[in-house]
Image (cartoon, coloured by chain):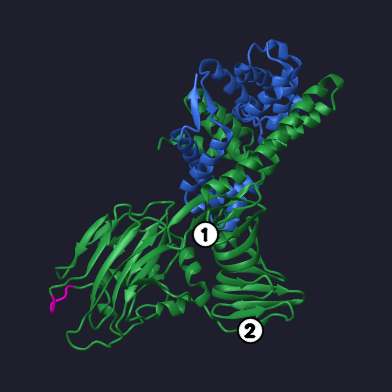
Chain colours: A green, B blue
Amino acid sequence: MNHYKEQFEDLLSGLMEGQLNESDNTQLNGLLREHPELLIVVRQHLEISELISHQKPLRSSEHVISELNNHFKSLPREEDIFVENLFERIRHRRLNRRLLIAAAVIALAIPGALLALRTSAPVVAQATLLDSSGNYSTHEGVREGEHIDLKSGLMRLEFGNGAVVAVESPAKFEVSSAKLINLKLGKLNAWCPESAHGFQVVTSETTLTDIGTAFGIDADPNGSSTFIVLEGSVKLKKNNQVHLLEEGTAMSTDQHTGLRNSTFETAPYVRTWAVNSGIVKTTGAVRPAKPDTPERLAKLYNDTEVMVIPEGRDLSFDQKIVAEISTPGHLEITTETVPTHSIPPVAGLRLNSYLVRVDPESKLKGAEHIYFQGSVTFDQPVIAIILGNSTLRETDIRFGNGKWPRIPGSHLRGLEMNYNTSIHDEVSLSEDRRTVTIAFQTGGSSDDIRVITAK
Amino acid sequence: MVAEEEFPGIVRETHTGLRFYIRSLGVRSAWVDDIAQDTYLLAHKRLQDLDQASNAIFWLRAIARNLVMNELAKNARRKRLLDENLTSILIEFEDHRPDHTTLGDESYLQSELYKCLQTLTRRARTIVDARYFQDKNSTEIGENLQVSPSSVRKILFKSRKLLYECLKAHKALTIEP
């Protein structure tokens, strides 16, 4: 980049925050006089920041017009007609908006989701509804203070601060703010990155505060709630009781008793955890892994199903990835070595990793093989599929869940050419890069592939 | 001539575009609405000067521009401007390049803005949220996310650029002479 452009960008960034001193201002104005084409850029940045600011409640249309009313009201009598007209207009608009929303809810036929409150409050999360078959049905912004009555399917909420929450029906909750959910009924699974620490979920009498974690809550309207921590820790507070709940543990409460230890049971969160983790849909022998702590997930074995195990999440793409598959298409393993591709890093992209694995646990003898076939669809595009023994090993520390290598015989865990059968392992990536289809011919050692998605 | 009862409708139709324009002249964000209100008060007094409602935005822009120029003459009130010299340059530039960014329908604009925000990376969205919705500066954002303030400013710069291009591509805003 030209030196002056770099300098201009720095100065304009400072200007937008109101942090330029007199000398900086002089420098910026000098640059603008010398390069008037940069004035268009200044305009654009001012305009777009204004537009984003309009989404704040205090700068919303209704607030601005109401303020204008107040101004006119303080003027002499002749302005009264204007004020009356303006108020009338606002009343109509509010009514129209409510009617439109009611109509939209009916027209969209969102299964069971009644977005009951629509105000000019800011949008704090983006909601995606999934029907019972795992198909996305709608996608829209959720405003601060919005009450949601989810009667079927699942909802995934992505908050501006990075928190991701998945809720399974039947559920009733309020998105009270960008950092607070009031859960009346339903199963909820949340993942909070650093930027969302302090995120809270309030059930009937208990407040859960995130301290850097993934957790689940199952609440019923009678006041009973169960809390489990899959990763990190959370703080639980009920009346005068405060507990720090650590990874792999659970507590429960009801309207008559305080918080007490309970069994770490993850089965209720199978669907919410998968959706929260970005696994939209699986078919055939492929299944999302049962939710668990990263340490236990790293040791997960299953000889009857191919498990999709979430690994590293929201990782920066700051170094290249070496992978066997980097573009849509079909690969059949018919040679001893599969060529690899180097995918260069892209600043700003965030990566999620998933291990797709089946392990027959030495139940098979000799030349016995089991054939597994199925697919998994992710919420983000797949940029790499790693399937060789060495490429898997090389990426374990970067993307994996636990300490590697830890599994006996793990040097043979990738896909390899089968000498004893004419049926080969196959992997396909769909044209839209969301679906990975596998056909594994699994013998005495596990078959693993690592799928990397990016956003 | 525009009738009195048409004025509330004009306010409703134009206030987003007018505030957008006022900001593009280098007015501080906190003062944009204030100047927009002054513009409407003045416009209402002179309503007989407006020939038809469809020309209202151009007429209102001219009034707003004069109000901003008045700011340059009032030393005590220059706090409303980011920098008076910058505003002078922007007004001068407008005389040579009178093309303006015109906004589409407000609800469409809002829905497209949210769609465009979704095209940003999660980190960029977090930073935009912290800057524009939580009013944090780049130093505070940097501390929270453990990145340098200059990286935050770079991400904000890039995000604003991407959002502008995205809205333009979706025809939520257009450049008109």
Comparing labels 1 and 2, the label whose residue is closer to the camera = 1
Which is more toward the observer, A360 or A268? A268
Q: Is residue A50 above or below residue A414?
A: above
Label 1 amino acid? Arg
Q: Residue at x 60, y 28 (%)?
A: B17
Q: Is residue B116 above or below residue A247?
A: above
Is A305 left, or right, of A65 in this rendering?
left
Q: What is the x, y in percent for residue B101?
A: 53, 26
Report crowding for label 1: few under 14, some 14 to 19, many 20 or more residues within 10 A (C-alpha). many
Q: Residue at x 67, y 18 (%)?
A: B63
Report crowding for label 2: few under 14, some 14 to 19, many 20 or more residues within 10 A (C-alpha). few
Which disc is residue A260 wearing? none
- Residue at numbered disc 2: A261
Label 2 amino acid? Asn
Is A274 left, or right, of A237 in this rendering?
left
> Residue A454 appears in which quarter of the rendering?
bottom left
Q: What is the x, y in percent for residue B109?
A: 54, 36
Give the quadrant of the N terminus of chain A.
top left
Tell me which label, 1 or 2, sits earlier in the chain: 1
Q: Is residue A135 above or below residue A364?
A: above
User: Which span is picked out in magenta?
Assistant: A417-421
SS of the residue at dot 2? strand
Q: CA distance from mark 1 to mark 2?
A: 28 Å
- Residue at numbered disc 1: A156
Using the image, name the chain to which the residue with label 2 belongs: A
Using the image, name the chain to which the residue with label 1 belongs: A
- Is any part of residue B92 visible from this angle? yes
Q: Is residue B116 above or below residue A194?
A: above
> Residue A332 appears in which quarter of the rendering?
bottom left
Which is more toward the observer, B159 or A83? A83
